[in-house]
Image: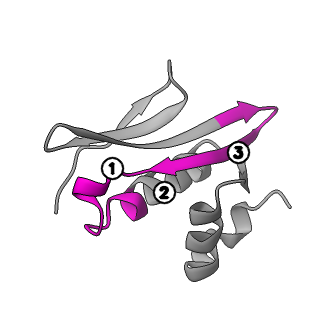
Amino acid sequence: MTMTIIHNTAENRFQVEVESHLAVLDYALMDGVITFTHTGVPSPIEGRGIAGQLVQRGLNYAREENLKVIPACSYVARYIERHPEYQDLLAI
């Protein structure tokens, strides 16, 4: 499934709209550290890999911007555990 993930800097989140439902990856940014705080995918569009794609986009953004990552959201923490190529981004 190809999606266009938007980086909504005004709302501090990565987002994608699928079938009129908004899925998000919220974050806080301070002093070179991005803290991913919440991943939300509405139930009608769950199970399609949307959360994973949002997290991948967020982590790639962190790498591009030389940011360290704090995975305050449990989904993001599990994603990083399962994808060791992102573990070097961890601030902790």
**Image quarter of the C terminus:** bottom right
Which circle's residue, 2 or 1, is located before the other in the chain? 1
User: Which residue is rendered at x = 58% and y = 47% of the image?
Assistant: 38
What is the crowding at mark 1: few (fewer than 14 residues within 10 Å), some, or many (at least 20)? few
Which circle's residue, 2 or 3, is located before the other in the chain? 3
User: Which residue is rendered at x = 17% and y = 57% of the image?
Assistant: 2
What is the crowding at mark 3: few (fewer than 14 residues within 10 Å), some, or many (at least 20)? many
Say whether residue 51 is left or right of residue 87: left
Query: Which residue has dot 3 on it?
Result: 35
Pick the residue in front: 34 or 19.
19
Q: The residue under label 2 is which amino acid type?
A: Val
Query: Which residue has dot 2 on it?
Result: 55
Pick the residue in front: 85 or 73.
73
User: Which residue is rendered at x = 55% and y = 78% of the image?
Assistant: 83
Residue extending furthest front?
43
Horizontal and vertical percent position of residue 58: 51, 49
Give above or below for 37 relative to 30: below
Query: Which residue has dot 1 on it?
Result: 42
SS for callout 2: helix
Span of residues in magenta? 28-53
**Image quarter of the N terminus:** bottom left
Mark in the foreground, 1 or 3:
1
Horizontal and vertical percent position of residue 61: 52, 46
Q: The residue under label 1 is which amino acid type?
A: Pro
